[in-house]
Every structure is written in C-alpha cells, then in structure tokens.
Amino acid sequence: MKTALITGITGQDGSYLADFLLYLGYEVHGVVRRSSSINTKRIDHSFGRLHLHHADLTDSASLVSVLAKVHPDEVYNLGAQSHVRVSYDVPGFTHEATGLGAFRLLESLRTLGLTPRVYQAGSSEMFGGNEHSCCEFLSEECRFHPRSPYACAKVFAHHCAVNYREAYGMHVSNGILFNHESPRRGETFVTRKITRYVAEVFYNRADGPLKLGNLEAKRDWGYAPEYVCGMWRMLQQDRPGDYILATGETHSVREFLELAFQEIGEDYRAHITRDERLLRPAEVNTLLGDYSLAENTFGWRPMTHFAGLVKKMVQAELEDYERGLEEVWRFYHKD
Ligand code: NAP
Ligand code: F7E
C-alpha cells in the first residue's frame, strides 16, 4: 500500500484527490491548518479513513515534523492562498503560503533525506493570458508573465520545483493546470458564485441582484475530479516533468452566466449587476491551454467540456452532487 501526503486536503482539489487515492487503496495523510471554525466539510465523508495532521506551509518546523512522521511515497502540494483577487489584498501571506510554502516543503524533504515523488500545483495564471504569448494555445514552452501576487508566487514555486529536480535529482513534477471547477469549488470563485446564485433564484431565495466584475474574461474551464486524476498520473511516470492540463476550449464569464441561467429557464440579464470592486488591478483576459503533452505522455484528456460542466454545477446546486464520481475514478484508472 502506498502512502500519500496532501497539503491543501480541505480544498476543492485536495478533497477530490483524497477520494481518488482512497479509491486506489492508498493510505492518505493530509495537512490541515488550524482554524477557529470547522474547515473540513469537503472531507467529512471520509473522515475515519484519513490521517490528518496539523501543520502550515508558513511553518517549516511543522512540515518537517509531519514529513518525518509519515514518510510518504507521494507528496501533493496543493495548499495555497489560491484566490487571485484576494492575493492583491494579502500579497505577503500569498507569497508566504503559495510561493515560499513550496520551497519549505521541498527543502524539508531534502534535509530529512526523504525522496518521495512530489506534485507541485502550478497554474495557468503563471502565463498571464494568451495575449502575452505568441501561441494560440498555451503550452509548456510558453513563457510566464504573472499578473498578480498569486501568479508571481506560483512562478517562484514552479522554478523551485525545477531547481530541486535538477540540483538534487528529486522526482518533482509541476502540473500547470487551467481553471477547473466543481460543486466543491470555493463559493467566491466566479463559477460557483454564479451557480449558487442560480439555485437561490430557482428556490426564490435570492436577496438582490448578483454582483459581478468583468464578464468578458475568458477561461479554459474543466471539471476538477478529472484534473486530480491527471495529478496522480503525472507522478506515476518514471521521469518527472512539467505538464499542462486543460480542455483546449475557452469561454467567457458571460457565456457561463447564459448557460447557467438557461438551466432554470431564466435570462441572466434580469439578475445581475456590475460591481467595480470585483475588478482586478491587472486582469488575465484569456486563457486557453494545449494539453497534448499530457495526452501523449500519460494518456490524460478531459471528459467534461464547457456546457457539461455548467450543467453539472447547476444540477449539483439543486441536488446531491456526489453521484457519478465513481464513474470518473474508473475511467482514469482503467490501466
Ligand atoms: P482551494 O480550494 O483554495 O484550497 C486551498 C487549500 O490550501 C485549502 O485546503 C487551504 O486550507 C489550504 N491552505 C491555504 N493556506 C495554507 C497554509 N498556509 N498552510 C497549509 N494549507 C493552506 O484551492 P484548489 O482549487 O483546491 O486548488 C488546489 C491547488 O491548485 C492550489 O495550490 C491552487 O493554487 C492550485 N490551482 C488551482 C486551480 C483551480 O482552477 N482550482 C488551477 C490551477 C492551480 P483551508 O481549507 O484551511 O483554507
Ligand atoms: O475568476 C472574473 C475574474 O476568481 C475568473 C483560481 O483557482 O483559476 C482560478 O483563478 C474570472 C476572472 O478564477 C467575478 O475577473 C468576474 O477573470 O473564478 P475566478 P481565476 O482568477 O481564474 C486559476 C487557474 C488559479 O490558479 C486560481 O487559484 O472571472 N470575474 N466577476 C469574477 N471573479 C470572481 N472571483 N468573482 C466575481 O464576482
């Protein structure tokens, strides 16, 4: 039985990854940070099967202590202050947790002499958008142009991962993941904000119009459970590498609104208002990724595309969304 350690296990991806690794028969450990209110709702359904440890990516000693106890075969570094807009409000903390946190984890492994395979959660935000690239589809070869404290921190973490791989021969892979969403997405990210509001309208619980920022921004939006399977596949390769996971389609926030409201037979224009405070000091206008390296190397490709994702998210707000996950796990583990 393999042992995995996940930082960020209470987040969207961490919770799906924990589900998938338990399904595969792993012993799953997770890093949980102390909170004054309960922050484990996404993993409560597997509580008895998980090994949870208090630690924090801003605290090296806590990381050393957990790693020395667990001796993992695989480490997935998903912990981060992951909200781009919020990273402008708390840039220092974002750099500490999202950037230096990755360094602390790698350096703790090195000093302990541990050699697990490591996944570093990189982001399409590192590219700053297709307008900063010469390619129609962003690939692993395109240069980074970070446009927020969050993206700067992720670029730093990415380069640390490459450096530990080259300097110390560590098996560290960078996933460069484009937006991936789900019913477990945090409520302040735009897709979940919209689908929650749609459910409120449907049940006559909406309290005033939905306040939104830039509706013209375009994202390459995929379905999160499929992306965590890609993280795992990346670490099963003999050689570490850097891989993009994306859908190869891009759609605007406005298109997401249109489809989401269509699900309940409403016109979004009657329900929204613009709030300047939700605009960003520097926006990433368009993201569109090329996942062909991941497909050619380890057979990963997205199953759910834009319209299917919107439908899944709206339906899940209206009913139980846990059904159907088994199908995803089986598809990606077929070999
Ligand atoms: P998320 O839902 O925001 O989860 C972030 C996780 O990090 C939470 O478990 C959070 O704990 C934890 N965390 C925050 N600060 C921490 C600290 N100082 N020490 C330890 N843990 C800390 O993010 P996600 O959507 O699952 O994304 C997972 C990772 O992939 C993140 O690194 C994100 O930046 C990256 N990423 C996400 C996407 C996407 O579209 N979802 C795309 C590319 C990259 P609490 O629950 O206590 O807050
Ligand atoms: O914004 C626009 C906003 O916050 C998407 C994180 O997981 O993916 C995520 O970052 C777009 C932006 O996600 C609102 O301006 C309009 O253009 O849902 P978001 P994000 O910034 O793309 C990347 C890949 C990550 O790595 C990050 O960790 O939607 N937008 N109105 C809005 N966005 C928000 N949040 N709220 C609005 O009201």
Image (spheres, rainbow, N blue to C red):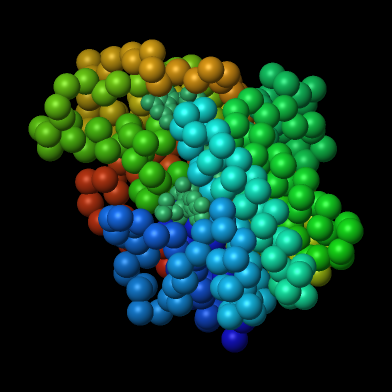
Q: Residue furthest left?
A: 204
Quarter of the figure with residue 24: bottom right
152, 204: nearer the viewer: 152
Q: Nearer the viewer, residue 205 or 76?
A: 76
Left or right: where 136 falls relative to 275: right
Residue, far right = 167
**Residue depicted at 32% across the width and 67% down the height:** 44
Does 96 sit above or below residue 152? below
- Foreground pick, 51 / 258: 51
Image quarter in which the N terminus is found: bottom right
Q: Position of residue 232 (x, y in %)?
A: 63, 64
Please, is residue 52 above or below residue 134 in the view?
Answer: below
Q: Nearer the viewer, residue 1 or 68?
A: 68
Can residue 328 be seen at all in this image of the molecule?
A: no
Which residue appears farthest toward the bottom when viewing the image? Answer: 1
Residue 255 % position (x, y) = 43, 24
State how many labels appear.
0
Residue at position x 15%, y 29% in the image: 206
Q: Is residue 266 visible?
A: yes
Q: The C terminus appears in which quarter of the rendering?
A: bottom right
Q: Tell me where residue 74 appears, x and y as whole percent.
A: 65, 71
Q: Is residue 181 left or right of residue 312?
A: right
From the viewer's perspective, tell me whether residue 299 is left or right of residue 269: right
Residue in view at x 34 percent, y 40 percent:
187
Q: Is residue 154 above or below residue 230?
A: above
Residue shown at 86% from the left, 64% from the top: 168
Q: Position of residue 333 (x, y in %)?
A: 58, 70
Quarter location, residue 34? bottom left
Up/down of 141 relative to 52, above or below: above
Q: Position of 289 compared to 37: left or right? A: right
